[in-house]
Image: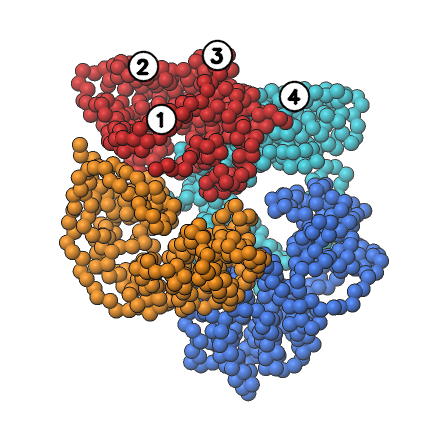
Chain colours: A blue, B orange, C red, D cyan
Amino acid sequence: MKPTSPVRRVSGTKQGRAAPVAARYVQIRAVSERLAQPLSAEDCTLQSMPDASPVKWHLAHTTWFFETFVLETAVAGYRPFHPQFRTLFNSYYVGVGARPPRAERGLWSRPSLEEVHAYRRHVDQCMAKLLTASAFAPSLRALVELGLHHEQQHQELMLTDLKHLLSRNPLRPVYAPPKPYPRVAPAKLAWLAYPSGLRRIGHAGSGFAYDNERPHHRVYVDAYEIASRPVSNREYLEFIAAGGYEKPEFWLAEGWDVRSAQHWNAPLYWERHRTLWRAFTLHDTQAIDPDEPVCHVSYFEADAYARWAGGRRAHRR
Amino acid sequence: MKPTSPVRRVSGTKQGRAAPVAARYVQIRAVSERLAQPLSAEDCTLQSMPDASPVKWHLAHTTWFFETFVLETAVAGYRPFHPQFRTLFNSYYVGVGARPPRAERGLWSRPSLEEVHAYRRHVDQCMAKLLTASAFAPSLRALVELGLHHEQQHQELMLTDLKHLLSRNPLRPVYAPPKPYPRVAPAKLAWLAYPSGLRRIGHAGSGFAYDNERPHHRVYVDAYEIASRPVSNREYLEFIAAGGYEKPEFWLAEGWDVRSAQHWNAPLYWERHRTLWRAFTLHDTQAIDPDEPVCHVSYFEADAYARWAGGRRAHRR
Amino acid sequence: MKPTSPVRRVSGTKQGRAAPVAARYVQIRAVSERLAQPLSAEDCTLQSMPDASPVKWHLAHTTWFFETFVLETAVAGYRPFHPQFRTLFNSYYVGVGARPPRAERGLWSRPSLEEVHAYRRHVDQCMAKLLTASAFAPSLRALVELGLHHEQQHQELMLTDLKHLLSRNPLRPVYAPPKPYPRVAPAKLAWLAYPSGLRRIGHAGSGFAYDNERPHHRVYVDAYEIASRPVSNREYLEFIAAGGYEKPEFWLAEGWDVRSAQHWNAPLYWERHRTLWRAFTLHDTQAIDPDEPVCHVSYFEADAYARWAGGRRAHRR
Amino acid sequence: MKPTSPVRRVSGTKQGRAAPVAARYVQIRAVSERLAQPLSAEDCTLQSMPDASPVKWHLAHTTWFFETFVLETAVAGYRPFHPQFRTLFNSYYVGVGARPPRAERGLWSRPSLEEVHAYRRHVDQCMAKLLTASAFAPSLRALVELGLHHEQQHQELMLTDLKHLLSRNPLRPVYAPPKPYPRVAPAKLAWLAYPSGLRRIGHAGSGFAYDNERPHHRVYVDAYEIASRPVSNREYLEFIAAGGYEKPEFWLAEGWDVRSAQHWNAPLYWERHRTLWRAFTLHDTQAIDPDEPVCHVSYFEADAYARWAGGRRAHRR
């Protein structure tokens, strides 16, 4: 993502983690709205596949989180903004009751994007009061923390899902204009060696962490080597040119089957224009920059590349 | 459809068939826009199943017809409104070139509803010039006629497809407010007898007719009886109450299989609320009016009802 | 079908329609067994698609018909051969009770082919006694008639289903050896003209007829022309060579979609070997005989051929 | 598996690992045939789902392994038993060439079971000669070892796949008669505590090991407790009785979705007969023995049980 794109604050908020929660609430919630800002209500309503959700749904669901888990608990006599939103914008919290099938999120033209924004304002006002009140229970604070990180996760999904949606449109809509940025040729690839040993991974501190970052625990890691930088598009293009997508000997059996069934011949969003490769991006379709790290490759493609490139060597003991 | 609903002119235009084509063009095109008027851009963009299309697509596709088959032929040097609309809004005219799969019409947030309206205005202006010009070839006139009837067909589809879309929304949106209308108890059902004989069916005149209304031809019809009026909801409710949906002896084998696979127990859009049946309509969910004709029944349900009601008697010769 | 193939009596029995029912019962039942005779138990057990049934199932189901509808009705205290066969070999007679899904008929290795033959012998013995008894109700006789025609229908299906099954085997098994037969060049195709008029179709006599052959009724048929003989393979090959399968203008829209989805480029069972076409048959894969009538073409292919060949002319009135 | 069932030698061969390879070849190959011995050719030909294979296919594929990887390499001028078997019985060794889709293995009535047995005898004779020859390369010996373990894996699959097939037959065929065996009440369940530490896992010796048993490597294991014996049917029945299958709080989200889509309410092959549970087995349908370990539970069911039973405790640090 380029520095001045609408998403610039996604990472920006990381610096502000020490700020008071009320301030960070305002800041993070605003990012979601800034991400949706270049989009029409129509853009925000569509769902391009069952695994993706409409932007409007993301905006509502993240709000539903604060309403359901914070306001309904902490505010005596809280009246929900809309009686059906509790069900409509529940994602997978089975304990909260029934929820519509995920694949049907793209069937709802109502509530409108405008109503969802009103929903956000309503909840934000209630949250502002709560967060600035003197008596603010630590258990509640943890829930708010969780809600904010939850929203940041959905900010990533908004862009991911949107990219897929726009890519399915023959008009190839542009989300935001491309920005010039300094091209840097990648350093020569080296192999960094690490000795075997017991390591500690996971979240150790007292601050927020996702459940899958916990617990802090030890693992034994055998001696290994790792490349000094990501694989570049130039290197990946060599794999393609060498017939990497046509040679089963580089692929796991399951990967080969998926490749065949889905006719893979390049990373997702790549398109061949005669002899040239271009990629659909949120900033218009662009020529592949050979110096950038390759992206939108599946596990199976990464595995096949690594085997082809000699990066998966036979075990030596 | 109630008299003052937005669709009232759909049938109204029938009376105007003698009007000059330029006037009828304006009148019929306006109906499409009036039908879409109560809807948001979001409502117009969604597709609820492969067999249905978004309202926005209907608005654009009917316009595409005039642009592709009339303007491109009749206007020297005509420049299409948008270079990709020719493909995007082609439905099934294989001769006009490739077209996107029908099931993907609901993936396009662009062009926006606003752009589609601009597309309509642009084509309408060009058509107005053409239709009022002195030299207006008869072959062209036939195409314009076809385009107007084509648009009227799509006006029906707009409402049909919209009804299905809104019915899938848990919020049960209301397209237009219900209007009071005089309830009339159905007359006592009688059987009207017709003798056998050669009849003429199909379109005989020189005016417009759909291809499936032609040619005018003779058929031999055996002696038969037909009910004097449609089956009412009250009569159909008796069929339901008598276990009609649970008794295979009333159903064709294929109908029974569909009924079982899709769990049919009432007409489409009917919902049981305890002991009461209600139906989702474009004018809010309403209690079933026992005096209205039953609707939204499939061929298989109509056949099963008729057999249950004794309306499909053994052949008598 | 060649004259000395195992199926020769399928049509042969037509001549014996006047024979006493007991004799015809023996004769027709023997045909089913003769058809299965060249097959292994394994051949008889497989089902290659939901629309087809195993040969073993056909052998049992036709027997089930006589047991269920004749013996259980006419023989006091009749004890079924096997208590579960009534359900297992029910096809679609919903009134007789539950039945297993059609697509699961190929999951049953038991009863064995040998047991099914024993089932046939048991029912045949009981039927023999019944059919030769002095008191033999006419209503029963009609059911036996129906059962015999039902079995003849299934004899056709046995070969049809078997052909599909064997065609899916890479070893290309041969059901019966090919026999030499006189090749006759087709006569020059002429068009026979028929005047319009009222005609009578359907079964008029008092003998057996399938329900879809009744009632005898009148239809009005417009004046038409029909070819004097079936289309030959040579003629159909010209359609293929002329790109008939690649030109949407010859196809109905629905036919074109099926053609595309299923990659049709020739009749079912045809295979191109370089420049030559061969066809999989029950008598080994054979070079296409240009003089034989084309077969295994769908409605859509026949329609496209007819349009290409000028056989579907615009209506003239 | 009961001691005198046809499969008793599956584990028996483990003791014979030290025996000469020629003797073990004979012994292990004989087990496959003994497993198939109670089955008809029809039983051996069917495939009940894409993930399972016909017993006949297992018998042929394990033979194909020796023919393709051993005989074709080691025997100069070896002529394959059948030119098409190389393709027909290839499972997933992409390097060996094309192979038919897995789901079509159940479409082949030919080769017959008898031919497959002849194929086995042919390959076994060639292998016998080879294995008793004086010059026998170590690299070849490793391949034969692999082939024998490969066959033992398929022996397990033969029974697993067969069980599924027979369970789909409404006649509930019995593979082998049940045998009395001593019932032993399970010991009281205790929790065994293990300290944290570095452990070594994987195959360390020089003998045969599957590729997924290698390499021998170290892992760090945190302190944990494990039950002293498997969960019994009695204990699992308590989980069912407590509504374990109806309470989402015990299930992983993905598990809950599968449970719902597939209507799970008990382990695979369990059937409720009024208040009693019975299980389909290869030795007839039997009452659930409360003292036996529960089996045929998926990962998701095991996980839900463990959470319900308190065996998945919150992390303690």
Q: Is residue D240 above or below residue D181?
A: below
Are the two marked residues, 1 and 2, in contact with CB atoms closer than 8 angstroms? no
Mark nearer the N terminus (1 vs 2): 2
Q: Nearer the viewer, residue B26 or C287?
A: B26
Residue at point 54%, 83% (across, down): A128
Examine the rendering and report whether any part of residue D177 can be seen.
no
- Give the residue type at disc 4: Phe
- Give the residue type at disc 3: Pro
| Residue bearing the label numbered 3 | C182
Local packing at callout 1 (Cα closer than 10 Å; few below 14, some 14-19, many 20+) is: few
Looking at the rendered structure, the secondary structure element under dot 1 is: strand
Looking at the rendered structure, the secondary structure element under dot 2 is: helix
Tag shown at residue C193: 1
- Give the residue type at disc 2: Gln
Q: Disc 4 to disc 2, how far (Cα)? A: 49 Å
The spot of residue D298 in percent (x, y) is 53, 48
Q: How many numbered dots are placed on residues in this image?
A: 4
Q: Disc 4 to disc 3, how far (Cα)? A: 38 Å
Q: Give the left or right position of residue C149, taking residue D162 as reference.
A: left
| Residue bearing the label numbered 2 | C15
User: Tag 2, which chain?
Assistant: C
Tell me the mark number nearer the camera, choosing from 4 and 2.
2
The spot of residue D260 in percent (x, y) is 46, 53
Mark nearer the N terminus (3 vs 2): 2
Residue at point 76%, 29% (across, down): D140
Task: Establish whether labels 3 and 1 are both on one chain.
Answer: yes
